[in-house]
Image (spheres, grey):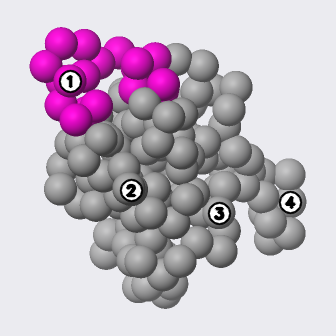
Amino acid sequence: MVVGSQAVLGQFPNASANLLGSIEADIFTFRHPKDADLIDGFIGEGAKFHQTFGCYAHGVAGETAIIPVGWKVRLIPVCNANRGADRGLCPEVHDFAAAKLAAGREKDCSFVATLLRQKLAQPALSEFRLWESSLSGERLELALALLKRFTPG
């Protein structure tokens, strides 16, 4: 499961270059929380994979992102011929945008602003997903204010 900014590739494999600037993908597995250590060891920063391909993964906990209710039924599968039956999963763009707004970091907000500007995400559905998240009180108000700030026109 990809939860970092590169999750945008799941739904938009041809996204613009300004959405694809990171060489890191934050990922977790549904199997076991300790898989994060395996991810870091085998395909993490500085690993042979990183040295060979110029990109790497950072293993994270499944609870890292605050994703709205129902996110699992909206997951986007990522497959290619090189992986056979194996597949990755990415959150749907509005779940992803809500998680980024919940994090509230400048880089996350800038990313959401780009999604909205390029019409890859809709403001109303992103807002709905924020209301469906586990955020409440000031954190929810801040995320909603950020969305409003980055909503075009």
Foreground: disc 2 or disc 4: 2
Percent across and percent down for residue 31 are 57, 30
Q: Which amino acid does label 1 sit on?
A: Glu
Q: What residue type is labelled 2?
A: Pro
Would you name the residue on which mark 2 appears? Answer: 152
Q: Can residue 6 be seen in this view?
A: no
Q: Which of marks 4 and 1 precedes in the sequence? A: 4
Would you name the residue on which mark 1 appears? Answer: 141
For label 4, the SS is loop
Percent across and percent down for residue 148 are 30, 41
How packed mark 3 is, by other alpha carbons closer than 10 Å (few <14, some 14-19, many 20 or more), is: few
For label 2, the SS is loop
Foreground: disc 3 or disc 1: 1
Please give the range of residues in magenta: 128-145
Image quadrant in which the N terminus is located: top right
| Residue drawn at point x = 40 percent, y = 26 percent | 130
Viewed as shown, does residue 140 lie left or right of 37?
left
Q: Which amino acid does label 3 sit on?
A: Phe
Would you name the residue on which mark 4 appears? Answer: 84
